[in-house]
Amino acid sequence: MLSKEDLGIWEEKTLSALYDFYLEDEKYDCAVLYAEKLIEFYKKNGFTPTAYLFTNLADSYRNLGDSDKALDAIDRGLEALPNDAELLVEQVYYYEDRNSSGIVEAWQRVIEAAPKVDVPYNRIAMLLNKEEKHQEALDILNQGLSEIPGSINLLGRRGHTYLCLKRYQEAADDFLETAENPKKQFTWWDIGVMYIEAAYTFWTYLNNAEDATKYYFMAEESGLIEKVYDKTILGSVYQWRKDYDKAIEIFNECIDNDPTDDFALFSRGYIYKQLGEDVKAQADFEWLIKEYEKIDKKSHDVYRLMGCAYLEMDMSDDAKDCFEKSASALKTEGVECFCVNQSWAKYYKYLGNYQKALEQIELAIGIANSVINNTLKREITLSLHTKE
């Protein structure tokens, strides 16, 4: 005969097994039923439930569309397990989902209760960066890293914060430290992401083609570059290296994946023109312009790329019109971008006015000291000297 204690153990195991089964099978109504039975069993027998039980109960209620009961499950968990870090974090996530006020203060309370957990530092920094309080975000991340040295979440976030503060070398250092973390606390995909972030920083802000190329290729080797946007960047690197076959291969893949990928279409057209395949180039530029003309409210980027296509088609008046509209849209959008100055530099270079072109590319470099801007500056300077 089984003792009362033995029967209790088997009752708990049965309820737990049924709960896990329904949870895994995504039958959340049944999962909720057995989770509640399990919580009642623990309460009746004087046992303390696990945080896992309450967080998964909350997820089940959320999947059933009942956010009130989901939050109630977390609150009940904190009654049973005061100051449990996992439950405290989940509670504030629910407040964030509801756009509640005082989120930063709520995350601060989590830090006080569980200072060794990196999530609150990361979330506070995200919120502060969103409000453009970048120095405050950096301060909270440094506080977090003093508590949790080497945290990959905090290092990656600090890298992005350094970018906001235009402290580009420090940003690249953080991205690389995250990617090369010996603890291997993350997947190959995350490693690749950090290599791409470092490479992008070297490419766009530090005018360091050697390191940028190195880390883009390391990201490619890691198997990361799956997203179309990332592939267009990689295609640009091959294009800059004049490895046109590889660049076209990448841009073709991007276009196959998304026939409206404007950057890939323009870049492929540009390469075709460099290779003397004017018919193919013209087709890409015309298709791009035709698609852009369908857009009612065009952004500065749309006008810019449209103008560049016109310029490659030797339609300089149309290009000028687009660049003027790009500059006007940029003012309306209220963002700082080097692209308009770069576009004017290309326009004046096309006209043979190399001095004006040089002035414009210097302005572009002042905003983004990029490999591409500096490459264009060298071309303009060479043309200016040749003219003289």
Image: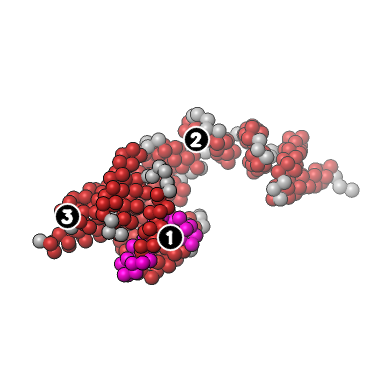
Q: Could you tell me which residue is drawn at 69 percent across and 48 percent down?
A: 26
- Measure the alpha-carbon separation of dots 3 and 1: 34 Å
Q: What's the magenta region? A: 255-280
Which amino acid type is shown beneath numbered disc 1? Lys
Mark 2 surroundings: few (<14), some (14-19) or many (≥20) residues within 10 A: many
Task: Where is residue 128? Give x, y as percent.
Answer: 41, 37
Q: Secondary structure at mark 1?
A: helix
Which residue carries the number 2 mark? 107
Q: Using the numbered discs, state the Cα–Cα distance from disc 2 to disc 1 in whole angstroms.
A: 37 Å
Eyeballing the image, is 15 above or below 109?
below
Q: First in sequence: mark 3 or mark 2?
A: 2
Question: Three-letter amino acid code at disc 3?
Answer: Asn
Gap in angstroms between the C-alphas marked 3 and 2 = 56 Å
Position of 366 with respect to 64 (left or right) is: left
Residue occupied by mark 3: 353
Q: Residue furthest toward the top?
A: 101
The residue under the point 76% across, 35% down is 44
Q: Give residue 1's position: percent from left, percent from top.
A: 89, 48
Confirm whether the magenta stretch covers residue 6. Answer: no
Q: Is residue 283 left or right of residue 98?
A: left
Q: Which residue is mark 1?
A: 231
Do the numbered discs 3 and 2 sit on residues whose CB atoms are within 8 Å?
no
Is 311 placed left or right of 155 in the picture?
left
Q: Nearer the viewer, mark 2 or mark 1?
A: 1
Dot 2: element: helix
Q: Amino acid at mark 2?
A: Trp
* Magenta stretch prevailing secondary structure: helix
Mark 3 or mark 2, whichever is nearer to me: 3
x 39%, y 62%: residue? 283
The image quadrant that residue 124 belongs to is top left
